[in-house]
Image (cartoon, helix red, strand yellow):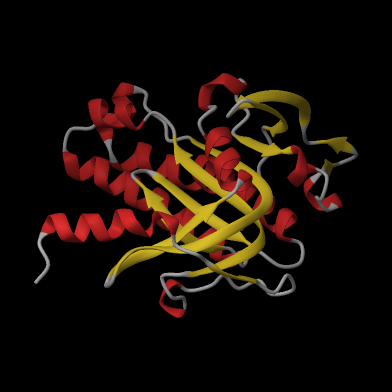
Amino acid sequence: MATLKEQVDEAVEEVSKTWTKTTWLTTTTAVPDPDDMGYSDAKVVQATYLYSDLIDSSGLVKAADTHEEVASVMSTFLKVAVRIIRAENGHIRSFDGDRVMGVFTGANRKTRSVRAAMKIEYAVSRLIDPEIQSVFKSLQDAGWHIRAMTGIATSEALLVRAGIRNNSDLLSVGLGPNLAAKLSDLRDTLAGHHIAIGKGTYNGLGESVIMSKGKDMWTGPYSLSMGGGSYNYYTSNYRWTSL
């Protein structure tokens, strides 16, 4: 069996390897499965990325009486977000603590991703929070309410299989995943607006997620600095009214 040093040296040497790139079908809503890709395979996709992040999880830990209460709240948020993303034909490709990443491909991917974000906002504020206040007296007494921030961005991305055998996943490389993550980090800086989307996503939206009763649901554009560049984005404080 190779030593740890030999294994690390082998991994480092792979930095110069050549990727076998193919273009994923732009008409399908599917996303490649890691198990169907080799470790030198790469897929070029046109995709919209959604990051939904629980706000003030540190405040949750401080307010809750037990770790079990914290786990229940986080687990419920992630379960609900996953179900909503999948219902809009999005694919779950990553969890990071209290944040979930969804990938949308195919027709209407921008509209579907934004509709998912608005449904997540509805579920968090109208379904999960009332239940939390009812079940956990500690959170009610502390005045802690569950909130989420969702960032969405669209770009061409390169999907590669990362990790080692029996412990691998897809790695997304491109502006879309980076910008979506950055937008989800804006959190409380948006004065009650809990959805932020890049300009490229906004420009491709369907009417159902742009206008509500004749009023534009979005404000902007605003400017965000990232990696030496500047990117425009829009925000909204609207939510879907049902699931």
In x, y percent, where is residue 91?
A: 53, 64
Tell me if residue 148 comes above or below residue 20 in the rendering.
above
16 horizontally vs 29: left or right: left
The structure residue drawn at horizontal position 74% and vertical position 73%, both measured from the top left corner, is 27
The structure residue drawn at horizontal position 23% and vertical position 55%, both measured from the top left corner, is 9
The image quarter containing residue 60 is top left
Q: Residue furthest bottom?
A: 36
Pick the residue in front: 164 or 212.
Answer: 164
Tell me if residue 44 comes above or below residue 198 in the rendering.
below
The structure residue drawn at horizontal position 25% and vertical position 46%, both measured from the top left corner, is 71
241 horizontally vs 141: left or right: right
The structure residue drawn at horizontal position 46% and vertical position 55%, both measured from the top left corner, is 80
Q: Residue furthest right?
A: 214
Q: How many badges with numbers are in the image?
A: 0
Tell me if residue 61 comes above or below residue 48 in the rendering.
above
Is residue 241 at all visible to an observer of this figure?
no
